[in-house]
Amino acid sequence: MKTKKLVVFTVLIITMFLTIGFNRTVKAREYTKVLEKKAVEFSDYTDVGYLVDNIKDERLVLLGESTHGTSQYYTMRAEISKKLIKKKSFSFVAVEGDWTAIYRLNLYVKGLYPDSEKGVEDIMKSFDRWPVWMWSNKETAEFVQWLKEYNSGKDIEEMVGFYGIDVYGHWDAMDRLLEYVRKNLSKEYENIKSKAECFTFFGKDEWSYARAVHRGHASCDSQLKDIVEILKNNKDYLSQKNEKQYFDAFQNALVVKNAENFYRLAVARGPDSWNSRANHFYTSVTRLLDFYGNNSRGIVWAHNTHVGDSRATSMDPRGMLNIGRLAREGLGRDAVFIAGFATNSGKVLAGRSWGSQVETMAIPQGIPSSLESKLSDIEYDRFYILFSEKYNQEDKIMQVVGHRAIGVVYSPENERGNYVPTVLPERYNALVFIKKTDALEMLD
């Protein structure tokens, strides 16, 4: 009798697991079918007209990437940006890069770079902060050169800018700030220099500084805030001398202040350091919108984890913000268009650890049940999906699915740790999928 009961119980357990597995498979197929019906195939990487036509009056367009080293992402973002600039009068492109380094390219595209003999690749080869390949690559160089030619012959106020919005590159920002103050606000030079030296006390080693503060050493937070206030209090005088130079100097001061905050918070556990960087992204972009005027419109290039609304991902329960969420909350959902990018396999530039030698690595196929795996079942090699409708929580497309995120540090062997649970239509307005991609072409 006991044996019979055990057999029945075993059969029930096996049936339950088979049913769960069957239901998951059915749900996966239904999810893929919904996406397949919405997929719009495109022929090549310049065929972005349909996507651009669906960008209406949004003030900010955020263009993502699921890696920092994929050629097609850079090429397509460039093509989308070109059309937005030409057809819809966008004012600037802001990228996940250092303010000071990228500002050299901003001067170049406006014909203002001090050394007129230097070409775009010459300038990019001066970038020396790891990961160099993110902005010293041929795909970006081609877009920057196009932007220079587009600006040619225009009045300076009509020229489209190119900027970096990250907190990194803070020592360069400090050097540029001090040089500006020495030339333009000499009465405050020694005061500002003294306050800045608080942060450089550990030999410009931000991590040694952050660990010391964590152990009880006094922070430089108030001194760096004072520098920002000094510049703010002298805005009228400095802006009258040269408004653009003042804008650059003030941003350098913000980079230094916010970098100190980012590194100091990074030593402690929790989301505060990440959120500090996210807030700097958003502050930098809104400053650019204000600088270019009431009718200005901006384009942002950054990782999917930065641009895709964090509330639609596993980042939200962990208290993590990003520019996608902040922009939707600050400007209004209808004023922001977010496009994510994904691939199922290919090659990518990345490092095994922070600061290590860059490698061309193989991207394995997406793990089963991931978004990448589901999208690869669609017959097209490359397509867009637009999420223009409003969905109910019961809709099949609203289920949570793992969406791959590869950073500058990558280990293909640990692939399962690279997926962000995502509700796709809430995270993006559109998704671009390319089944197989290639690595960026880094400059020598």
Image (cartoon, rainbow, N blue to C red):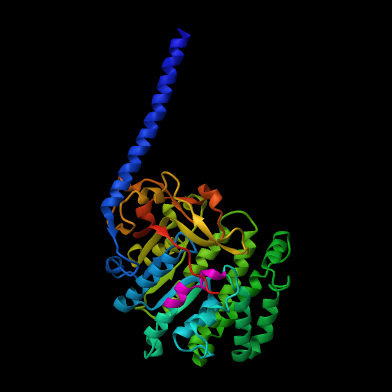
Give the residues drawn in magenta, as a range: 132-143
* Residue 149 in view, yes or no: yes
Q: Is residue 294 above or below residue 333?
A: below
Q: Where is residue 189 in the image (x, y as percent from the top left)?
A: 66, 86
In the rendered image, which quarter contains the N terminus? top left
The answer to whether residue 221 is left or right of residue 381 is right
In the rendered image, which quarter contains the C terminus? bottom right
Q: Position of residue 303 (x, y in %)?
A: 47, 62
Residue depicted at 40% across the width and 51% down the height:
372
Residue depicted at 51% across the width and 66% down the height:
279
The answer to whether residue 328 is left or right of residue 235 is left
Residue depicted at 41% across the width and 16% down the height:
8
Q: Where is residue 363 in the image (x, y as percent from the top left)?
A: 48, 55
Label the magenta part by its dominant secondary structure: helix
Residue 140: in magenta span: yes
Residue closer to the observer: 212 or 356 = 356
Q: Quadrant of residue 53?
A: bottom left
Residue closer to the observer: 145 or 178 = 145
* Residue 393 in view, yes or no: no
Q: Quadrant of residue 208?
A: bottom right
Residue positioned most to the top: 1
Residue depicted at 49% across the width and 91% down the height:
240
Q: Where is residue 123 in the image (x, y as percent from the top left)?
A: 54, 81
Residue closer to the observer: 38 or 283 = 38
